[in-house]
Image (spheres, grey):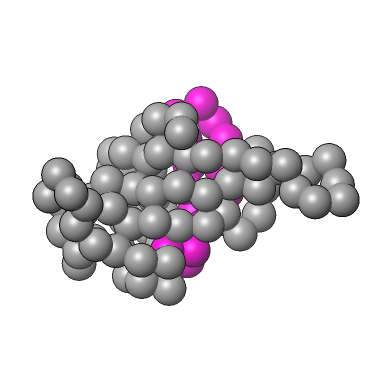
Amino acid sequence: MHHFRGKLFRGDQVHLDPANVYIQYHATEGGPGQAWYGYLLVDSEADVERGGTYTLRLVDGRAGTLRVDAVSPDPTRKVRATFVGDDSLA
């Protein structure tokens, strides 16, 4: 997984700043595209909504839409919001 920083938006409003995100990429079947998924580290389970759609804007200028699948504490007691990218991260 690759670690990035950025901002998480809900609509036009900044929802998390900074967004501490870990992303994994994989090639899509039958095409030249690249899918992405991963997790955000958040302060509490209330920081993002399960099933919610957000826009991630990385500090390097790339952006994409993601959908949060689950929010739960990990073994180190940090809270992870796992997600799947809904479109390309470009």
Looking at the image, residue 75 sits to the left or right of residue 68; the answer is left
The dominant secondary structure in magenta is strand
From this view, report whether residue 60 is shown above or below residue 87: above
From this view, report whether residue 67 is shown above or below residue 58: below
| Image quadrant where one finds the C terminus | top right
| Residue at horizontal 45 percent and vertical 47 percent from the top | 38
How many marks overall?
0
| Residue at horizontal 24 percent and vertical 62 percent from the top | 72
| Residue at horizontal 42 percent and vertical 63 percent from the top | 68
From this view, report whether residue 12 is shown above or below residue 25: below
Picture quadrant of residue 61: top right
Q: Residue furthest left?
A: 77
- What is the x, y in percent for residue 36? 58, 46
Picture quadrant of residue 15: bottom left
- What is the x, y in percent for residue 57? 48, 41
Residue 18 appears anywhere in the view: yes
- What is the x, y in percent for residue 16? 29, 50
Q: Residue furthest top?
A: 60
- Magenta stretch in the rendered image: 52-68
